[in-house]
Image: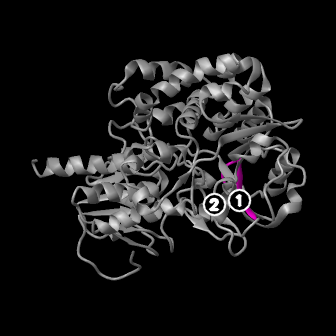
Amino acid sequence: MTSSGARARADAVVVGSGPNGLAAAVTLARAGLSVHVLEGADMPGGGCRTQELTLPGYWHDVCSAVHPLASASPFFAGAGLAAHGVRLLTPKVAFAHPLDGGRAAAVSGSAEQTALGLGADGRAYSQLLQPLVRDMPAILPDLLAPLGRSLPAHPVAMARFGLEGLLPASVLARRFSGDEAKALLAGVAGHTMRPLTAPLTSGFGLMFLMIAHSVGWPLVEGGSARIVDALIAELSALGGRVETGRWVQSLDGLPAARAVILDVTPRQFVALAGSRLPARHRAALERFRYGPGVCKVDWALSGPVPWQAPACLEAGTVHVCGTFAEVAQSEADVAAGRHPERPFCLVAQPGVVDPGRAPAGKQTLWGYCHVPAGSTVDMTARIEAQIERFAPGFRDLILARSVRTAAEQERHNPNYIGGDISGGASTLRQTFLRPTPRWNPYRTAIPGVYLCSSSTPPGGGVHGMCGDWAARTALADLRRANGS
C-alpha cells in the first residue's frame, strides 16, 4: 500500500477501497490488468474496518461486524481468504431474539433443530425453511446477481423463494401463532430498514434465515478489517496498489486509465462527473432514494452481557426489541421520520467466539438502531435501555463507549448518505432497478466509467459481488473494444 508517489499509468483506476472497490480491483487484476485503487481516508476498508474506538486493547468493527454474506458469497468463495489468514468463526447460535420473561427465540443449527424450540410453530417453520435451505446453492447465486437480466438458472427454486419473498413480513408472519417464530422473522426482516408492511421484507428475512441454517452467521477473528487485509494482499501479489489519503473531487482529476470503477453512491457520482454526465442520466441518478440512517454505539465492557435468556449468551448476533409488533412499530416510526422510544437494536458480541477482541475477561459490544436519515439524535440511552430490559445489570459493565449519530456516520464515510449504511433504500423498485433503469446497472452514460458500490445490485452487505459484477462488465467492454 502506498500513500503517495508517481507511478506508471494503470489499466484501471478504482475509487474507493471498501469491499466492493477491492473486489473489483482484484477481479480486474486477476484478468491481467494493472490496477490503481484510490482511497480518501487514511486507511482502506470503508465500512469494513476494525479500530480501538473506546479503550486501548478493545477492538471494534467500525461498521460491518457479522458476515453471513461473506461466508456464502461466490466472490469470496474464490478469494482464498483462508490462505491470507482470515478465519471465519461461527457462533453456536447464529442469532437470538430475546422476549420478556427470560424467553428467547434462537436460530441454531438446521431448520429442524431450530423448529424444536418454536413449540406449536415448529412444523410451520420447518415447512417454510427446509425447502429453501435445500435449494440455497441454486437460489443464492441469483439473489447475488442483477435481478431480471436473465432467466434464473434454477427457475423452480427461485419461483418457490419468490412466492414467499415478495410478501411483506407482516403477511408471512401470519403463518405463525407464537411470539418466538414471529420474532425471529421480525429480526431478520428488520435488516431491510423498511416497514415490515413493505413488499420484499420477507425475502430479505428468508435469505438471512436460509444462510444461517446453511453456513451460520460468522464473525472474523480479529475483526472485519482482516477481510480487507486479505484482499489487499491478493491485489498486491497481482501487481495492484492502493493509495490512501487521496480524496477524488472530479473524474477529470483521475489518472488516465482504460477503465474507471467507482465505489461511490449515485449522489457522489453526479458530483464527480459534473458536466460530463448527460442530463437524462443525471436526472435518473438524482431520483435514487436513500434509506434511514443508523445511530451506532460501541462499548468496552468489564464482562459478558448478562442476558436473562441462555440462548443469547451463545449468540454472535442479538436482535433486541421484543415482539414482532414492537419491531414493526419501531420500523414504522423511523419510516415516518420519528425516533422510536423503544428502537429495534442490532447487537453483535464478538467475544462469544473471539475473546481476543478485548483484554482477558473483558468484552467488546457493537450495536445500532435505525433512525431517520441525517439524524443528529444520540440514541445511546434508548439503545442501552433496550439491552438492559433483557439483560439487567448491563449498564454496570460499561467501561467506555463510542457513539456515532447518523449525521456523523456520513461525515466519517461519505458513502453513508444520511447515515444509510446500505447504499440506498431497499424498495421494490430499487431492488430490481438499482441504481437506475438500465439493462446493465454497472455501466454509466460515460464510456469506460462504472459504478460498483452497494447502490448497485445486489445491494448492501460484505459480499463483494457489486464490485465483481462491475469489473466483469468492464472486462467485457474492454475485450469488445479490442475486438476479442
- The local crowd at label 2, few if under 14, some if 14 to 19, many if 20 or more residues have their Cα within 10 Å, is many
- The verdict on residue 322 being magenta is no
- Principal secondary structure, stretch drawn in magenta: strand
Identified at 69% across, 39% down, the residue is 335
Q: Which amino acid does label 1 sit on?
A: Thr
Q: Which of 106 and 326 is in front in this view?
A: 106
Do the CB atoms of the residues marked 2 and 1 lie less than 8 Å apart? yes
Q: Residue at x 23, y 72 (%)?
A: 9
Region rendered in magenta: 362-374
Image coordinates for residue 142, horizontal then vertical, percent: 40, 32
Q: Where is residue 170 in the image (x, y as percent from the top left)?
A: 69, 24
Picture quadrant where residue 220 is located: bottom right
Numbered disc 1: secondary structure: loop
Tell me what residue is drawn at x 75 percent, y 40 percent.
311
Magenta region includes residue 363: yes
Find disc 2 in the rendering and name its residue.
409
- Which residue lies under the disc numbered 1? 405
In this view, the residue farthest toward the left is: 483
Question: Is residue 21 visible to the viewer in this orientation of the structure?
Answer: no
Q: Which amino acid does label 2 sit on?
A: Gln
